[in-house]
Amino acid sequence: MEKLTYAEIDNTVLNTLEPPTRMYWTIVTLLFAGVVVGFACWTYQILLGIGVAGQNNPVNWGTYLINFVFWVGIAHSGTLISAILYLLRAEWRNPIARAAETMTVFAVMTAGLFPFIHLGRVWMVYYMIPIPNQRTLWPNFQSPLMFDVVAISTYFTVSVLFWYTGLMPDLAIVRDRATGVRKKVFRVLSLGWTGKYEQWRHYSRAYLLFAALATPLVISVHSVVSWDFALGVIPGWHTTIFAPYFVAGAIHSGLAMVLTLMIPLRKIFHYERIITGKVLERVAQTIVLTGLIVGFAYGTEQFIAWYSRNTVEMEIFRFRAVGGFALAFWIMVICNTIIPLLFFFKYFRTSIFWLFTISILINIGMWYERYVIIISSVAHDFIPHAWGQYFPTWVEFGIMLGSFSLFFFLFFLFVKHLPSVSMTEMKEKVHEEAAHG
C-alpha cells in the first residue's frame, strides 16, 4: 500500500460525505423507482394471490427461492472478508472490509424479504414466531421455512452488531468535523465515543467477539439454506455435498459482488490510494480458489449421480447438461468455473476492465446456478407425465427488479452518508507498517 498519513486517510474518506451531485440523486431516484416497482408487484400479488406468479405444478419454487439463496450467498462473502480474514489477520482486507460488512447487512435484508414473498399469505407470518396464539399452533421446527427464519434472523442480528461496532470510532470522527443537525445525529450514533483507553479496550474485545460469532454463522446459515433442498427427496437435491457446495458457492458469488461494488466505488470517490490494485488482485486470487472449489463440487455431483447407478439421479444430471436446461447449465459452468481461471494470469488480475467484467459474469453464473438447482429438479422429477417447465411472470420479474434496486439503493445511500472505508483500521495498518519499517 502506498504510504498515507492519518490526515490523508481522514480527508479522503470524509470528502466522500460532501453534498452529493445531481448525478448521484438521479441514480438514487432511478433505484428508488425500481424499489417502488418491486413493492407494487408484491402488493399486486398479495391482493390477487400467489397464482399471479409463474409457480405451479410441478415447479412450485421459482425466482423467489432463487433470489433468496442468491442474496444469502452475496452476504456470506462480506462476512468472510470482514470477520474471517480479520481473525486470520489478512492485511489486504482493511480497505474493503467496511463496504463488505455493509454488503452483508443489505444482502441479508434483501434475502429476508423473499420467504415472506414466497409465503403468499404474508399476514400469516406471525405463526412462525414462537408466541402463544388463539389457535394454539406452534411453529413446526422441522420445517425448512422455520430453519430459514431462525438462521437468517440470527445472522442478521450478529452482522448488524458487528457492522455497527466497527463503525463507532469513525462515527465519532465524522461527529467532530460536522456542524448543526448533522453533528447532533452523529453524536447520537457514536454513543459518546471519546477515544479513551477503556473504550478502545472494550471496542477491541467486542469487535473480536462479534468476528468470532459471525465466522461459524457463515458456515451454518448457508448450510441451513442447503438443507431446505437436501431434506427433500427430489432427484438432484438429496445429496450430502450440498452444505459445503452451497457455502463455497456463496463465498464465490460474494467475492465477485465485492469487486462489482468496489471498482466503481474506488473510481467515483478517488479511493485509488486506499483500495489499491493489490487489494483487488488479492480478491481475484481468492476467486480462483473458490472457483476451483465450486468446479470440484459440480464434478462431484455428476460423479455421485453416476456412481450411485440410480437411473433417476443419472437422468436429472443428463437432463441438466443436454436437456431443456442446457443453456442455463452451461452458463453456470462457464461463468463460475472456467472464466474465473483467467485470474491465473496477472494481466487479468491487474486489469480493472477485466476484473469488473469477470465479476459481473460470475454474478450471472451464480444466479443461474441457483436457477438450475431449484428449477430443473422439480421440473423433471420421478414421474415423466408430471414433467413441466417454468417461466417467471411479469410479477416475478418486477419483484426481482425491486430486490436488486433495493440492495443498490441502500448501498448508494450508505456510501454518501457514512464512512465507506474504515479510517480506524486504515490508521492501524499505517501504524503497523511504520512500526515495522
Image (tube, rainbow, N blue to C red):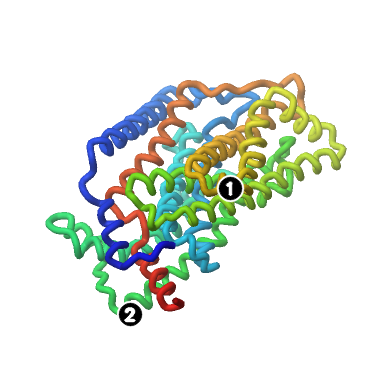
Tell me the tag on residue 252.
1
What is the crowding at mark 1: few (fewer than 14 residues within 10 Å), some, or many (at least 20)?
Answer: many
Q: Is residue 261 above or below residue 201?
A: above
Residue under numbered circle 2: 198
Type of amino acid under label 2 = Glu
Q: Residues within 10 Å of mark 2 (few under 14, many from 20)?
A: few
Distance between the alpha carbons at the discs numbered 1 and 2: 39 Å
Q: Earlier in the sequence, mark 1 or mark 2?
A: 2
The N terminus lies in quadrant = bottom left
Foreground pick, 408 / 52: 408
Indicate the amino acid at tag 1: His
Label 2 residue SS: helix
Work out whether residue 262 or residue 56 is closer to the camera in this orientation and state it: 262
Measured as percent of width and height from the top left, residue 349 is found at 55, 48
Q: Can residue 134 be spotted in the picture?
A: no
Residue 319 visible, this orientation: yes
Q: Residue at x 23, y 40 (%)?
A: 21
